[in-house]
Amino acid sequence: MEKKQKWSVIEVIPKEDYTLILTFADGKKGVYDFKQDLQYPVYKRQRDISFFMKAKAIYSSVVWPDDSDIAPEHLYEACTPLKSDCP
């Protein structure tokens, strides 16, 4: 079994305000504001909120049905930490 890196995404909860609530392999929890990424052509489909909401934690990252993803290392560094009592 492959050892997960600390920045491996183990859970993602997409929100309708284009944020992602993330849980990482080392227990860190945070929120990532995806709105800044919507300007990039690779994320054109994510502009549709129903498509954005289909984000899943697969292959240690956040992945959508069209196989677009975002680097988990970036998510780990750029997310705003959540307190453990936050949903």
Image (spheres, rainbow, N blue to C red):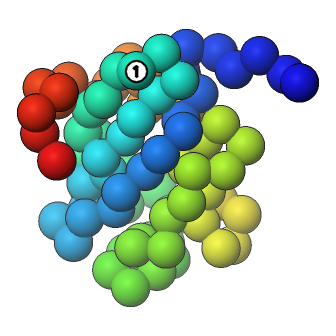
Residue 39 visible, this angle: no
Q: Residue at x 61, y 56 (%)?
A: 63
In the depicted structure, whether residue 35 falls above or below residue 48: above
Q: Is residue 61 visible?
A: yes
* Residue 20 horizontal side relative to residue 25, left or right: left
Q: Residue at x 32, y 51 (%)?
A: 20
- Residue 39 is situated, as x and y percent measured from the top left of the image, at 37, 59
- 70 with respect to 51 (left or right): right
Q: Nearer the viewer, residue 45 or 72?
A: 72
Residue 56 placed where, x, y %? 55, 60
Please name the residue that numbered disc 1 is placed on.
Answer: 27
- Residue 79, picture quadrant: top left
Please name the amino acid that badge 1 sits on: Gly
Secondary structure category for the residue under label 1: loop
* Residue 22, image x, y percentages: 37, 40
Q: Residue at x 12, y 26 (%)?
A: 83
Depth check, front residue: 45 or 5: 5
Left or right of residue 12, residue 42 in this image: right
The relative height of residue 53 versus residue 55 in the rendered view (above or below) is below
